[in-house]
Amino acid sequence: PAPAPPRSSASASASASAPESTPTPSGPPATAPVDPDGAGTLREGASGPEVTELQQRLLRIPDVYRDGSTSGRYDPTLTAAVARFQLWYGIRGDETGVYGNDTRAALESRTPAGTT
């Protein structure tokens, strides 16, 4: 009869530790704030080859990003150029100055790849 109580306390401690392990899956949602707008969305503060490609494409649109930099940094000048492109071409669906899916589709349709 003595072994029965330890077995029940062991199962009680196992069930008590289970709720503690439940909050651990907060790892994957933590990556969401990094790109809240969805994959491929660029905004001020971003940097890298995707930003350089955006800058190069905008330079091919007359007067939108005149003498703009291709530094690969999404700076206020680039934000203004993206906002100008969105305004001039009637693009809706993305925040002003944010390079999201709608803006990307419109810019890519006007600037075919490979013509840098």
Image: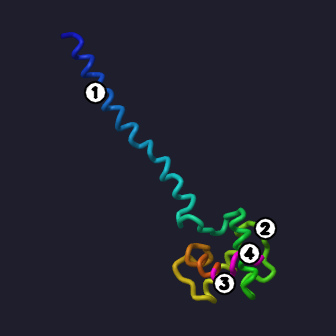
Dot 2 or dot 1, earlier in sequence: 1
Q: Is residue 13 left or right of residue 65?
A: left
Secondary structure, mark 3, is helix
For label 1, the SS is helix
The numbered mark at residue 114 is 4
Mark 3 or mark 2: whose residue is earlier in sequence: 2
Q: Are marks 1 and 3 in contact (CB under 8 Å)?
A: no
Which residue occupies 22% across, 16% down? 4
- What span is colored magenta in the figure? 109-116
Indicate which label's residue lies in the foreground, 3 or 4: 4
Q: Which mark is residue 110?
A: 3
Any mark on residue 71, and which? 2
Q: Earlier in the sequence, mark 1 or mark 4?
A: 1
Which residue was labeled with disc 1?
12
Quadrant location of the N terminus? top left
Secondary structure mainly formed by the magenta segment:
loop
Instruction: From this view, report whether residue 35 is shown above or below residue 65.
Output: above
Residue type at mark 3 is: Arg
Question: In front here: 105 or 100?
Answer: 105
Badge 4 crowding class, 10 Å Cα cut-off, few under 14, some 14 to 19, many 20 or more, is: few
Whether residue 77 appears in this view of the structure is no
Q: Residue at x 56, y 61 (%)?
A: 35
User: Residue 68, located in which quarter of the rendered image?
Assistant: bottom right
Disc nearest the viewer among 1 and 3:
3
Write the residue at 67% across / 75% down.
79
Q: Give the mark, 4 or 2, whose residue is nearer the N terminus.
A: 2
As displayed, is residue 108 above or below residue 13?
A: below
Percent from the top left, x then y, of residue 22?
Answer: 38, 41
